[in-house]
Image (cartoon, rainbow, N blue to C red):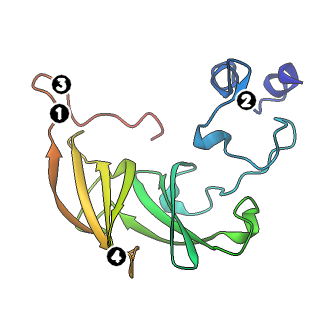
Amino acid sequence: ELQELTNEGRLSEDELSATFVGGQLSPLWRDAYVSPSPLDRVPILVATEVSENGFVQEPQVFQVGDTLHMIYTGGSSLHHAQCDADADPTDPASWTKTAVILGGGVGGQTGVADHSGVYIEGSTIYLYYRDPSGGLSVATASTATPTVLTKIQAVLSPPAGVDTPLANPHL
């Protein structure tokens, strides 16, 4: 079965080895699919927007009230999708893409915004992400309006001597 995936061009040798780690399926976003079989997996989200530049990855899912929110990297920006909390989150039809929320001038961040992590405290969402310098920045949003982010500040700058900006291998 696994050899068929590489022969059909569905997975490269590198992707195949990254998918199965110690006999277990990988937790990587590119492998976040409904079926446990690599032959009949169904992607939860597919890159359909021009701003996604052909890929979606690195999901962060959290619940606020009756809605599941997903923040994911698409292209060189962060995007938002949502799903009703009563719906099946493993069914691709349950998710609706809503907007680019950070990067490319949106949310006060010009250029790249990707590789994110979400932290929620009280009614504030803190979104940490890689900025165009290759450093770590933070933006915030209210849980009442999770798609309206405001860049706050850079948290960490790249180390001295590191060639920046860091290249995104997907672009």
Mark 2 element type: loop
Q: Which mark is residue 20?
A: none
* Amino acid residing under circle 4: Val
* Left or right relative to 22: residue 53: left
Residue 139 place in picture, x, y as percent: 26, 62
Residue depicted at x 59% and y 37%: 28
User: Which residue lies under the disc numbered 3?
Assistant: 162
* Amino acid residing under circle 1: Pro
- Spatial distance from mark 2 to mark 1, Cα to Cα? 33 Å
User: Which residue lies under the disc numbered 2?
Assistant: 11
Residue depicted at x 73% and y 47%: 33
Mark 4 element type: loop
Mark 1 element type: loop
- Spatial distance from mark 4 to mark 3, Cα to Cα? 32 Å
Specify the quadrant of the image occupied by residue 6.
top right
Up the image or down, 84 lies above or below 35; here it is: below
Which residue is at the front of the view, 149 or 100? 149
User: Which residue lies under the disc numbered 1?
Assistant: 158
Up the image or down, 148 lies above or below 79; here it is: below
